[in-house]
Image: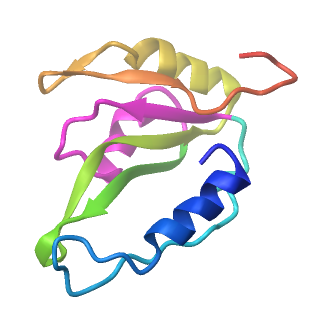
Amino acid sequence: MSTVQEAEKAVRMYHGYVIYSSVRPLTVYITAPRQSGSPFEIFVCNLPWQVDDSWLEKLFSAHGEVVDARVVYYERRGGTRRSRGFGFVTMATEEQSYYAINSLNKQVLEGRTLRVKVSRESPQQGY
């Protein structure tokens, strides 16, 4: 959500909501934004569906030291997880981050064209 008011509205609307006669209602709450603690976080989207954290780490490690690599998942019925098609990678240095971005952006992997960019803009540096 882009504002606190939108987040509060989402909690009011969806907390406890039952989807498609599911046994479990949704749990919706407000949390603090997730911060990696590093300005070198990279957003990667249009990932092949079978990608997991270790695959993402291996892909980026060819371009520098990977501090963290995580694919965002959603739960499917039966408790299985499936990639949402995007994830985040944190590199050790700014130089490595830009090297990885320039090397991997628009590369085709398993029929999907990756989009790779800085995760969030830094007001001081104006990425």
Q: Position of residue 125 (x, y in %)?
A: 82, 18
Q: Residue furthest bottom?
A: 23
Q: Write the residue at 70% across / 26% down.
A: 121
107 or 92: which is nearer to us?
107
Left or right position of 125 against 104 = right
The answer to whether 66 is drawn above or below residue 116 in the figure is: below
Residue 87 in sight here? yes
The answer to whether 110 is drawn above or below residue 5 in the figure is: above
Q: Position of residue 103 (x, y in %)?
A: 42, 14
Q: Write the residue at 64% across / 63% down.
A: 8
Which corner quadrant of the image does residue 80 belong to?
bottom left
Q: Which residues are magenta?
A: 40-65
Left or right position of 90 against 115 = right
Q: Position of residue 57 (x, y in %)?
A: 39, 44
Residue 51 magenta? yes
Which corner quadrant of the image does residue 120 belong to?
top right
Left or right position of 78 against 4 = left
| Placement of the C terminus among the 4 image quadrants | top right
Residue 49 magenta? yes
Q: Write the residue at 38% across / 52% down.
A: 72
